[in-house]
Image: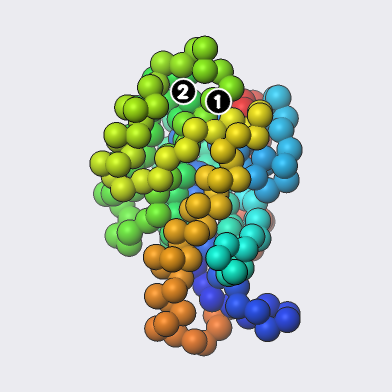
Amino acid sequence: MAFNFSQGAQGAARYDAKLVILGASGVGKTCLGLRFVKDQFVTYTASTIGASFLVKELTVDKQKVSLQIWDTAGQERFRSMAPLYYRGAVAAILVCSITDEGSFEKLKEWVRELQANVNEPLVLAIACNKADMAEHRVVPYNTAAQYAASIGALIYETSAKQNTGVNELFTEVARKLVSSRFRTTENTSSTPRNPLPDPMSDMGERRRGCC
């Protein structure tokens, strides 16, 4: 699994974790990642081709965690590439738009794909994005919350535009990783591992998109 226990320059332990963001095209996956990592919001972003890669280090419960965030393409023509990016992930954020019922159905397809192809348990979270467009809502929160409960996932309503729920979403995923996975790793092995490799040379380009 793609999480490692490594030793920082000051001797402090740090956990490195691979997190993948999945969802239909145009639901705001890239905007969520950029808001969390760089505190940026861009009204127009290029569609992801293949996947893009971001890193954010944070501290939860006094534990340093480095999240390697893989933002995957939502377009159907890149669907076959998805296993390359979610393989080895220890957490997945599944994104839908509250203004697009089809994106919620696509989210369920991603969950089924993960369940069929990932042997190890994942920390799952659902992001009901574009909460700033509540007047156009077609995905009721209760519906999404019931589904999240059925698969054991965290759920947050988010708005990358208004910076609502974004930090809470990623931080809670990291907290759950620390409590449910990394503590076990620390207890079973005290030997620091090498950091995860930097896959930037493999990243795709970007072309049209959304927030």
Which residue is at a point 40% across and 49% down the rendered structure image? 124
Q: To which quarter of the image does residue 71 belong?
A: top right
User: According to the image, label 1 marks what residue?
Assistant: 130
Which residue is at a point 50% across and 12% down the rendered structure image? 136
| Amino acid at circle 2 | Ile
Circle 2: element type = loop
Q: To which quarter of the image does residue 82 belong?
A: top left
Residue 6, above or below 96? below
* Inter-mark Cα distance, 1 to 2: 6 Å
Residue 82, above or below 174? above
Look at the image and tell me in which quarter the N terminus lies: bottom left
Q: Nearer the viewer, residue 172 or 121?
A: 172
Circle 1: element type = loop
Q: Mark 2 or mark 1, which is nearer the start of the sequence?
A: 2
> Residue 42 vs residue 104: left or right?
right
Question: Residue 210 at x, y = what percent?
Answer: 61, 25
> Residue 106 vs residue 71: left or right?
left
User: According to the image, label 2 marks what residue?
Assistant: 98
Question: Residue 8 at x, y = what percent?
Answer: 68, 78
Q: To which quarter of the image does residue 139 belong?
A: top left
Question: Residue 130 at x, y = what percent?
Answer: 55, 25
> Residue 74 vs residue 160: left or right?
left
Question: Residue 113 at x, y = what percent?
Answer: 32, 43
